[in-house]
Amino acid sequence: MSDIALHDVTKRYPDGTEAVKQLNLEIKDGEFMILVGPSGCGKSTALRMIAGLEDISEGELTIGGEVVNDKAPRDRDIAMVFQNYALYPHMTVRENMGFALKLAKTPKEEIDRKVDHAAEILDLKAHLDRKPSNLSGGQRQRVAMGRAIVRDPSAFLMDEPLSNLDAKLRVQMRTEVSRLQRELSTTTVYVTHDQTEAMTLGDRVAVMRGGVLQQVDTPRVLYNSPVNIFVAGFIGSPAMNFFSGTSKGAELKLPFAEVAAPDGLGEEGDVIVGIRPEDFEDARLAPANHPQGVEFEAPIEVLESMGSEIYAYFGFEGGEVSSDELAELARDSGAADVPGAGSGRAVARLNPESEIAEGDKARLWFDAAKLHVFSPGDGTNLAHRAASGGEPPSVAAEDGESRPAAPAKPQAARPAGGGEADTEPPTEPASR
Amino acid sequence: MQHRGSKDYVKWTIAIAVVVFFALLPIVWIFSLSLKTPDTISDKKFIPSDVTLDNYTTLFEGGLDSPLLRPLINSILIALIATVIAVTLASFTAYAIARLDFPGKSAILAGALAIAMFPQISVVGPLFDMWRTLGLYDTYPGLIIPYLTFSLPLAIYILVAFFREIPWELEQAAQVDGATPWQAFRRVIMPLAAPGVFTAAILVFIFAWNDFIFAITLTSSDASRTVPAALAFFQGDSQFTAPTGNIAAAAVLVTIPIIIFVLIFQRRIVAGLTAGAVKG
């Protein structure tokens, strides 16, 4: 009843810049949808357009089947949680939570009842008569949530609600948000730049870059078959390693090894190969008799032991990758999080029992079945049809509808060498 | 640390005492003058040897025809009306300037500033002529209008600064919560801008209350003459005595409303109402 749909929604500012370009997204009733991407990717703008705080330049937005483009925020029956909570400082917690109901002229007893109920869910009963300035960050965050749930709206919109909390509290509140949403099963759109939040919270995750939707699917599909190098680099922590390689017939040449090319790669020439840190292992501890396991030797430069796992940074030569997408990821997260981005260094996540030491030339192993191969031209995934998992590309998987035309789906037979100059990934029409 | 804290405290106390002494000395002197009899008024003594309240009582002799009562009422009404209008208009203007992007925004602010800096003496002459032609001479509006002209810019500047400090998210939160723009302004923005509104109100009131130049030029009778102008028309007991005592007494009296006004509102001004709106 309260699904949200965006059709070709575009946000253009007076100076001509487009913050959101032709966004197509369908959020089903009760679904927890995450909008994720680096800062400036248009995710917040998209959310604010759904809220009605930002005008829609082009396209159509429907909530519950009704076009709401020209409706004021107050007529959309949505509740929003702001990044800085935006609690009314001159009102007590009770007044803050009841403000919307008071504006709606709800009888006082009913307001009290609903506020009490919400306060109970959020464990705020003891603080109802305090002002926001006397609350801790976590409590303020809960009041902001409470203000939203008291109204029982048709959708929650959350704009980085956890980013102002310290790390420990953030993890705790993340679980809390997840539990709340499951209990209330209210349609929720949640904006974050944190891929961990995206992966753990969302039923589905929409990855955006530069105002363009890259891929929208379940966290698992995003992880296993990213449509392009950007999604691959963004999802997963530590981020995927990228190497430049050459594909030659059935062979795929990497800086440190040669492996059998994944089936259906069907392309000769330069490619970008992505390997997730967790698909590496200490060669001695590698699963035995793995058909596609490949061993190689690499100098270990830095070793970080986390207790439950070890991150080994190893160097390689002649395989550095540079691309706009990776550069943007590196900029956004601090280069340390994207070790493959042109640094000649990759990270492997090893079993904690590994005895590899810093400075060693160690034998490492990786699972060649889990390679991701991308076109160096526009960064699209060339082989996810063939890679492990066998899950179909997410964008088409959405609801089984045949996607109309889908012209910009370039994984089909690109010219060898990826000589095209365009660096922008293609517009991905999401479902529909 | 403790030691240094108390040392600072002493230093500050001394500094404040000096400033207060310096500022209050003339007022205390006037108060002393107002208690003296005509014979001792020029005896140069700080503490009156012969205390009398005659100077005060004669000010109100004769009810509405007394030298001070009617001007006092005029002063209060004119200052209050000017304050209410100025603060209301300034709130709307400042809100628009702080929140909206419209062409000519900076021109409005620059214009307001230019008007506030305009020497008042240069408009008094033309105003005198205009007001007589328009029938505004010696009326309440005749004084309220120029007061608004000069106090509005100040009020706008103060309020723009306050509105800018209020996070926009609060208003958006209110909108999402179902408030109309007016409700968001009334119930969220105004309460938070209250310290600014009161600051502006006090300054406008004081400006209108203290004004002499417009009051003396644009009035001719007790119908609209305010206290500062009325003081200039005081007469002594006889042709040969200066009304020094009466003027001192009236000066003390006109200071009192200002003090009350400031005392009432100072707590609202000081209150840091925006604390806690956003994580600090």
Image (tube, coloured by chain):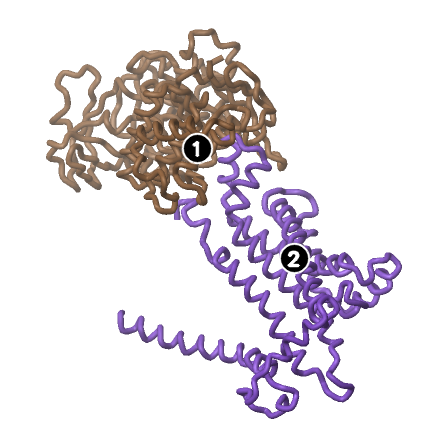
Chain colours: A brown, B purple
The location of residue A148, given as percent across then percent down, is 42, 29
Chain letter for mark 2: B
Indicate the quadrant where residue A215 lies. top left
Q: Is residue B93 left or right of residue A346?
A: right
Indicate the quadrant where residue B68 lies. bottom right
Classify mark 2: residues with Cα within 10 Å, few (<14), some (14-19) or many (20+).
some
Q: Return the residue found at the far right.
A: B133
Q: Which mark is residue B31?
A: none
Provide the residue designation for mark 2.
Answer: B80
Compared with A128, A3 (above or below) is above
Compared with A431, A167 (above or below) is below
Chain letter for mark 1: A
| Label 2 secondary element | helix
Q: Nearer the viewer, residue B237 or A386?
A: B237
Whether marks 2 and 1 lie on the same chain: no
Give the spatial CA distance, label 2 vs label 1. 36 Å
Compared with A180, B34 (above or below) is below
- Tag in front: 2 or 1: 2
| Label 1 secondary element | helix
Q: Residue at x 31, y 15 (%)?
A: A387
Provide the residue designation for mark 1.
Answer: A98
Amino acid type, residue under disc 2 in the picture: Leu
Amino acid type, residue under disc 1 in the picture: Gly
Q: Nearer the viewer, residue B245 or B273?
A: B245
* Residue B114 in sight from this viewpoint: no
The location of residue A330, given as percent across then percent down, is 38, 38
Pointer 2 with pointer 1, Cβ within 8 A: no
The location of residue A374, given as percent across then percent down, is 38, 23
* Residue B41 in sight from this viewpoint: yes
Compared with A177, A413 (above or below) is above
